[in-house]
Amino acid sequence: MIIILLISMLSICIISALFAGAFYLLGFNFFIAFLIISGLITFIGTMFNKFIEYKTQVSIATSAAMSELATSYQSIKLPCSYCNVSSVIKYVFNSDNIFECPSCKCKNKIIVNMLSARTTEPLAANTVVDEVLKKIEEDDKNGRTI
Ligand SMILES: [Zn+2]
């Protein structure tokens, strides 16, 4: 960081000295021209850095908004209430829940019905299948084929 700062300051001094030298040859005061040019270069560099920083922030905010929008889309296969053609619809769940039928171009309203259910434990494994699988494994270990 310090090296970059020193290189930047050295670059500004060199460029300012070159331009101030050119202005000196035209009859201007070298130090005043040097100060004005170095100030201009610093100002332009600062503005350029601010512009890049602003552009980066806008890009980050845009990508975050696009990501949020992409994750908020829901996909569901629904039949049209007019033509009864089923199609996969992408819609935003928290908006007005209206989609346009790709077949007849009519607007349909999505009605959401929420229910609750008890949580269940996984069913016990089928013991007959387990026994057959164990026998196959034993046969494989013993080198026999079915
Ligand atoms: Zn339709």
Image (cartoon, rainbow, N blue to C red):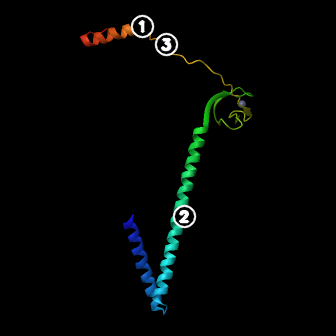
N-terminal of the pair, mark 2 or mark 1, is: 2
Amino acid on which disc 2 is placed: Phe
Amino acid on which disc 3 is placed: Leu
What residue is at 61 percent from the left and 33 percent from the top? 75
Q: Residues within 10 Å of mark 1 (few under 14, many from 20)?
A: few
What residue is at 50 percent from the left and 65 percent from the top? 49
- The answer as to whether callout 3 falls within 8 Å of ligand 1 is no
Horizontal and vertical percent for residue 72? 60, 38
Q: Which residue is at the front of the view, 120 or 56?
A: 120
Residue on which disc 3 sits: 123
Amino acid on which disc 1 is placed: Thr
CA gap, disc 1 to disc 3? 12 Å
CA gap, disc 2 to disc 1? 69 Å
Residue on which disc 2 sits: 51
Picture quarter with ligand 1:
top right
Please state, as top left, top right, bottom left or bottom right, where the N terminus lies in the image: bottom left
Residue on which disc 1 sits: 127
